[in-house]
Image: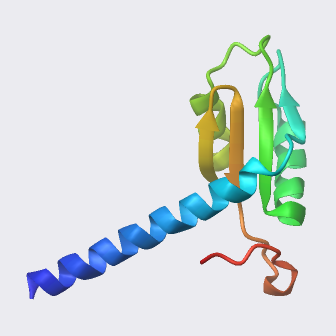
């Protein structure tokens, strides 16, 4: 019985990895639409990112050199405030994903 549960768990993990790889592949083709600078994460920036996520579902954000915060911490804060998922953080680039609330407006179909 535990073998069956382990297989189910592995299948879910493989599916998560497949979904993550798919989103990373899509993210390679898009340009950053936001830049985070000296003032770091502001309420106005958070609201704008939330609106962009609703419209696009997958966005890339660039952190400028004058921002003193680390990419991982900025990504975690943005994901928490916008209720999105961090797809990846590479250096000073962040990729966030959040499916559209309305299923009819969803542009990305996950595998």
Q: Where's residue 85, x and y in %? A: 62, 55
> For this view, does 84 lie left or right of residue 106?
left
Residue under the point 65% across and 60% down: 23
Task: Judge by depth and name the residue closer to the eye, 89 or 78.
Answer: 89
> For this view, does 64 lie left or right of residue 68?
right
Is 8 rendered above or below residue 46? Answer: below
Is 51 rendered above or below residue 93? Answer: below
In this picture the colour scheme is rainbow
**Could you say which quadrant of the image residue 107 lies in?**
bottom right
Is residue 84 visible from the viewing direction of this image? Answer: no
**Could you say which quadrant of the image residue 21 lies in?**
bottom right
How many dots with numbers? 0
Residue under the point 62% across and 64% down: 22
Is 3 rendered above or below residue 66? Answer: below
Q: Where's residue 111, x and y in %? A: 59, 78
**Could you say which quadrant of the image residue 58 lies in?**
bottom right
């Amino acid at each position: 019985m535990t073998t069956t549960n382990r297989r189910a768990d592995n299948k879910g993990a493989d599916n998560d990895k497949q979904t993550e790889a798919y989103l990373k592949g899509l993210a390679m083709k898009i340009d950053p639409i936001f830049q985070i600078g000296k003032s770091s994460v502001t309420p106005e920036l958070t609201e704008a990112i939330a609106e962009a996520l609703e419209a696009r579902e997958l966005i890339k954000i660039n952190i400028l050199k004058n921002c003193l915060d680390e990419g991982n911490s900025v990504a975690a804060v943005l994901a928490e405030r916008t209720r999105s998922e961090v797809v990846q953080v590479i250096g000073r680039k962040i990729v966030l994903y959040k499916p559209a609330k309305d299923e009819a407006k969803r542009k990305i179909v996950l595998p």
